[in-house]
Amino acid sequence: MRTTLVALFIAAALAVPSASRAQNTASENLTVSVNVIRALTLTKVSGSDLDFGINAAGTTPTAIAPGSGVQFEADGQANTQLLVTHSGDVDLTGPGDAIAFTANIVGNSADDAGSASVLPDATNVTLSAGGRFYFWLGGSLAALPASQAPGTYSANWTLTVAY
Amino acid sequence: MGVMQLTTPGSAKARAARTAWQSISLLLCMTIPATAQTLQPLQDLAIGDVITGTVRVVQPTDPSAASFSIFTLPNRDIHVQLSLPAGLQAAGSILTITFDPDSGAWSTTETAVGATRFDPASGVWVRTAGGKRTIYFWLGARVAPPLMQQTGEYGGVVTITATFP
């Protein structure tokens, strides 16, 4: 009797591995996600280039308030943060000594220069619920010495926005 | 195998007489399945923010790539097939997603850099070797929403099927 029982158990145990060798599969899922956001554009919407007009040597050109200067508009993903960088103060070059330009750049998520805030270089701002942010550029020129050579003086000034 | 002995109460003489034939032998056994394997998703494919009009490619070596692992026996062949979405869906909109021929990668180590690339659309045969029992997989992808693509969160599913022949 004992021999018979043991033989049955051994037979059963040996049968398991051969049955489990059949091909089998496992399956799982991964999710894929992406957040599509609007492309960012920056447009000069009003005003021509910043023009201080004709100024005599020995005088100080009249400063231009931001609201009377050049307006830019950024358009992008609503309520998204932007990094604003710009040239800051630059020198105008021409036939004589360079003329220092001090930039006055302000920005606002509303189209209102009066309530805009000064924007130092490398400032983070947030687009409005409509996906917009507005900039105004004014500034001032250094006093012109009496010896300033006559002619046209100019410089490029760059505003950049990025997500 | 172990032996368990059962003895009934009674006189010492009777017990002695009965013990010889009242003993019962039991075989204690444990079976380890020959195909102990697991398929384990490790990380979803989170492509992140993509600006309309731009292209975003997630390489399998990128931290945002999807990853999963398979644990099986040493020296075991495995076939991995991926069911890839052609588009990701948001409310009322579809964003095309593609998988480059080298968007898939696998390795017996847990590092995607230097892993063997494969075409996720074709699937891949792999084999555990060198005493290793785990194989790691990574999956990247490419999306290029056009400028007029509706903004928002898009999602889809990749189904992994591992076959152990």
Image (cartoon, coloured by chain):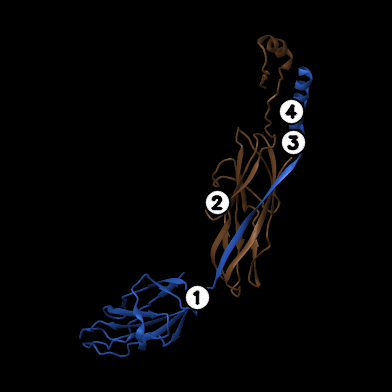
Q: Colour of chain B?
A: brown
Compared across the picture, whether A56 is left or right of B25 comes to left
Question: Mark 4 — residue?
Answer: A13
Circle 3 or circle 1, nearest the eye: 3
- Chain assignment, label 1: A
Where is mark 2, residue-wise? B61
Q: Is the residue B80 above or below the residue B32 in the image?
A: below
What kind of residue is marked 3? Ser
* Disc 3 target residue: A20
Q: Nearer the viewer, mark 1 or mark 4?
A: 4
The mark nearer the N terminus, 3 or 4, is 4
Q: Nearer the viewer, mark 1 or mark 2?
A: 1
Relative horizontal placement of residue A62, taking residue B15 as reference (left or right): left
Residue bearing the label numbered 1: A78
Image quadrant containing the N terminus of chain A: top right
Q: Quadrant of residue A71?
A: bottom left
| C-alpha distance separating marks 2 and 3 | 36 Å
Give the letter of the chain under mark 2: B
**Residue A39 image offset from top left, x and y in percent:** 53, 73
